[in-house]
Image: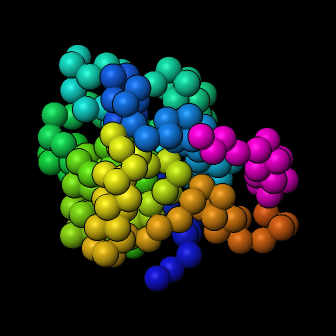
Amino acid sequence: MELLDVERSIVAIIDLQGKLMEMIYRPRMVIASTIRLMRLADLFRVPVIMTEQYPRGLGGTHPDVLAAYEELRTPKRRMEKTSFGCCGGPDFEELLSELRPKVTAGRRQIVVAGIEAHVCVMQTVIELLRGGNQVHLCWECISGRGEEYRKHALDRMTDAGAILTNHESVGFEWARHKDHTAFKAMSNLFKEGQITD
């Protein structure tokens, strides 16, 4: 197990979309925490990938999440998909390689947020692990239609080798030291408070 390395990390935001967002467990927490995770990625210049599962049928990314994504200055890419897992086609791996061209799959660290935990997130995570990537799951940024679906999916993913974390731990691991140039901005972000429901 390793701490996150800012030079090897990529944030993946999986399918935080319209109709599904109305049905998930603790949607406000997921939205607020994911936005903060993206803001951290921006502070530390960590690339972000955002995916959408069949948006014509399910609707687009939640407007608050999309607005935060569009404000990012860090390298970012969006991808539509029809396979449930992001790794179901070549596009996702190509985006990972494009955003971190000098980091091999065995050294990449993917920080994951998204829905649904037991479908698209879990299939993506298991495939990423199988491909040799490290996967860090921000538990407060991951959900599904019901607490049990979320809990058992997180359990299965950690049993498979993913690391359970949260967006604050991610930020502190990227900073490593109080003298990091992004530390003060990160600290101010955390002082904004948490949404827990």
Query: Which sits in the foreground, 44 or 189?
Result: 189
Picture colour scheme: rainbow
Rendering coords of residue 159 (x, y %): 31, 75
Residue 144 visible somewhere in the drawing: yes
Rendering coords of residue 68 (x, y %): 58, 29
Q: Residue at x 43, y 53 (%)?
A: 112
- Is 71 included in the stretch rendered in magenta? no
Residue 110 visible somewhere in the drawing: no
Instruction: Say if 28 sits above or below 58 in the image.
Output: below
- Is 190 included in the stretch rendered in magenta? yes
Horizontally, residue 86 falls left or right of residue 51, namely: left
Q: Magenta region: which residues?
A: 181-197
Instruction: Say if 77 sits above or below 46 in the image.
Output: above
Horizontally, residue 166 falls left or right of residue 104, namely: right
Horizontally, residue 124 falls left or right of residue 178, namely: left
Q: Residue at x 21, y 19 (%)?
A: 57
Q: Residue at x 50, y 40 (%)?
A: 26
Q: Residue at x 26, y 22 (%)?
A: 58
Total count of labels? 0
Quarter of the figure that contains the C terminus: top right
Instruction: Say if 176 sits above or below 59 in the image.
Output: below
Rendering coords of residue 170 (x, y %): 60, 61
Using the rendered view, name the quadrant where residue 81 is placed.
top left
Query: Which sits in the foreground, 170 or 115?
Result: 115
Horizontally, residue 178 falls left or right of residue 108, namely: right
Rendering coords of residue 14 (x, y %): 36, 42
